[in-house]
Image (tube, rainbow, N blue to C red):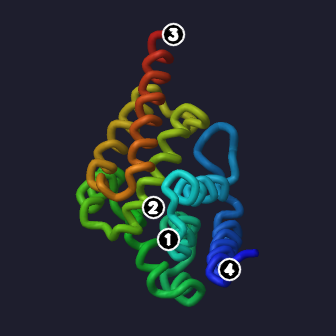
Amino acid sequence: MKTHSEISTLSLLLKALKFAAQKHQHQHRKGGLAIPYINHLIDVTDILLNIGQVEEAETLAAAALHDTLEDTKTTPEELEEMFGHHILSLVEEVTDDKRLPKEERKRLQIERAPRASFEAKQIKLADKISNVRDMIAAPPAGWSLQRRKEYVAWAEKVIEGVRGTNEPMERYFDEICQQVKVALENESTGE
């Protein structure tokens, strides 16, 4: 039998996933497989729960919602009304300002990672794990081998700023990066 706390966590998480699915319903991952975007949000949440052992309801909900401000027309006011100020603040911490050039956004992620809240660091770590895995499983369409290698190197710089946050996820990130680097190197040599 589930406790009241477990039911509350599940209820909030399902509400967040439903909201995210509606907001991202017409979006797909950048890969050639046209994977529905919600799959990425589920993956990030799953990484937090099952690899990072994160059970805090608001962190899991914020993970499911982490791209709504950045990639949909969702407003901060709407997110706060639906999920409260704490979840909004976590989502804002991991949101890039799309008005800035890509290189500036990437630089800011590296710079801001060490100052993020504990919860936001965990979400950032799970997001980067999901994205790095996709460099092999479902790379963005049109990305060259060199661009994928550069993405992994950049993700490692971002994650350096969150070290000491969640050891199981950090260890898994390092393993995934190593596997992806080997696979990309093999791809470049034709092996």
Most extreme residue toward the front is 1
Q: Tell me the kind of residue under disc 1.
A: Thr
The mark lying in front, picked from 3 and 1, is 1
Most extreme residue toward the bottom is 81
* Residue bearing the label numbered 2: 123
Label 1 close to label 2 by CB (< 8 Å)? yes
Question: On screen, 143 above or below 188?
Answer: below
* Residue bearing the label numbered 3: 190
* Residue bearing the label numbered 4: 3
Camera-nearest residue between 7 and 97: 7
Q: Secondary structure at mark 2?
A: helix
Of marks 1 and 2, which one's residue comes earlier in the chain? 1
The mark lying in front, picked from 4 and 3, is 4
Q: Tell me the kind of residue under disc 3.
A: Gly
Question: On screen, 147 above or below 13?
Answer: above
Of marks 1 and 4, which one's residue comes earlier in the chain? 4
